[in-house]
Amino acid sequence: MSERFQLAEFNFGTLKYDWEDKRVSDFRNNLERVNRLASRADGYIWRMPDAEMDAAQNEAGGVFGNARTASTLSVWRDVDSLSNFVWKTIHKQFYDRKGEWYDPEGNGNFVMWWIPEGHKPTVAEGMERFNHMKLHGESDFAFGWSHTRQN
C-alpha cells in the first residue's frame, strides 16, 4: 500500500496598518469572500480555522506575536489546484494589490511542502518549513513556485 500525499501551503505577512484601519478595509472585508471561493475550488482540502490562526498570530511569545500579521495555512490536492486558485481567480486581483496593505519588509513569505493525506499541518510546522527554505533554499522538503516549474 503506497502513501498518498497532498500539498500544504503557508503564507504570512505584516500589514502596514492595524486591522481596523480604513486603509486595509478592502482587504479585511473580502477575506471571507476569498476564503469561501477557496473552499469551493477544485482541489481544496482544508484551511486552518480562523480562531486557531488568530491565536497563532496574536499569542505573545508565539510564532508571530504581532496583531498586524495576516496568514493562511491550507491543504490542496496538488500544485495545479493551488496554482489555479491563486493565479486564475479573484484571489489574484487581491494578490496584485498586496503592496497597498502589506509592509514591503518581510512580505512574500510563502512555502509549500508535501504532507501525508489526511494530515493537518500546524503553524509551527509551516514556520519550520519556511525557515528551512530560507536557510537552505528550495528543495523537496520546502519549496516555492519556482521549484514547481509552474509559475
Image (cartoon, rainbow, N blue to C red):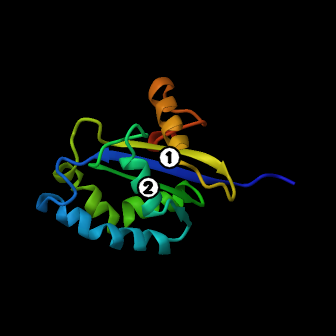
Label 1 sits on residue: 123
71 sits left or right of 43 in the view: left
Q: Secondary structure at mark 2?
A: helix
Residue 92: x percent and y percent?
Answer: 31, 61
Picture quadrant of residue 4:
bottom right
Disc ID at residue 53: 2
For marks 2 and 1, the one nearer the N-term is 2
Amino acid residing under circle 1: Val
Q: Is residue 15 left or right of residue 150?
A: left
Identify the residue at image location x=55%, y=51%: 8
Gap in angstroms between the C-alphas marked 2 and 1: 8 Å
Residue 20 position (above or below residue 129) = below
Marks 2,1: beta carbons within 8 A: yes
Please say whether residue 82 is visible from this viewpoint.
yes
In front of the other: 40 or 122: 122
Residue 79 in percent (x, y) is at 54, 54
Residue occupying the far top of the picture: 135
Residue 148 visible at all:
no
Residue 63: percent from left, percent from top: 43, 40
Q: Residues within 10 Å of mark 2 (few under 14, many from 20)?
A: some
The residue tagged with tag 1: helix, strand or loop? helix
In-front residue for pair 106/97 = 106
Q: Residue at x 55, y 64 (%)?
A: 46
Expressed as whole percent of the image width and height from the top left, the position of residue 54 reads: 39, 55
Please name whichever residue, 42 or 74, is drawn nearer the observer in this view of the structure: 74
User: Looking at numbered disc 2 in the image, what kind of residue is underneath it?
Assistant: Met
Q: Residue furthest right?
A: 1
Work out whether 96 lies above or below 110: below
Query: Is residue 66 shown left or right of residue 118?
Result: left
Q: Kindly give the residue lying farthest to the front in the view shown.
A: 60
Classify mark 1: residues with Cα within 10 Å, few (<14), some (14-19) or many (20+).
many
